[in-house]
Amino acid sequence: MEELNTDVLVIGSGLAGLLSALEAERAGLRVLMVGNSPLEWGPNTSLANGAFTVSNSHFSKEDHLQATLETGKGLNQARQVKTLVSEVRMP
């Protein structure tokens, strides 16, 4: 069995994983990225066609929460979605 050493292990190659890996590399760390999706499927980011929502002056946090929960079709975890909606800040 091959042993791999890394400073940072990123699990998932969607947008969040890619951005995390890039930031870690910019900080001079060795990064290993792994995922469990077959290559032809790609990460969830590609399955979502790269579309993301965020609360803004035209889309309230409550609307964002409801839309995200509905889009998740019962697969997302409501507590985590609530944290995402309440903590995300646009630059």
Image: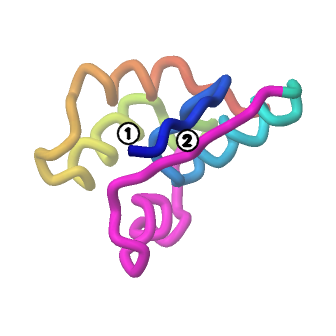
Looking at the rendered image, the disc whose residue lies closer to the viewer, 2 or 1, is: 2
Q: CA distance from mark 2 to mark 1?
A: 10 Å
Quadrant occupied by the C terminus: top right
Earlier residue among tags 2 and 1:
2
Disc 2 on helix, strand or loop? Answer: loop
Q: Amino acid at mark 1?
A: Asp
The image shows residue 11 at horizontal and vertical percentages of: 46, 40
Q: Kindly identify the residue that appears in the image at 49 percent across and 37 percent down.
A: 3
Is residue 53 rendered to the left or right of residue 57?
left
The chosen color scheme is rainbow
Circles 2 and 1 in contact, beta carbons < 8 Å: no
Residue 63 circle label: 1
Q: Amino acid at mark 2?
A: Val
Considering every residue shown, the one lying at the far bottom of the view is: 40
Residue of label 2:
54
Quadrant occupied by the N terminus: top left
Q: Magenta segment: does it hold 74?
A: no
The image shows residue 21 at horizontal and vertical percentages of: 69, 39
Q: Kindly identify the residue that appears in the image at 45 percent across and 28 percent down.
A: 85
The image shows residue 90 at horizontal and vertical percentages of: 71, 33
Residue 13 circle label: none
User: How many numbered marks does the figure carry?
Assistant: 2
Is residue 78 rendered to the left or right of residue 41?
left
Is residue 37 rendered to the left or right of residue 52?
left
The magenta segment is: 29-54
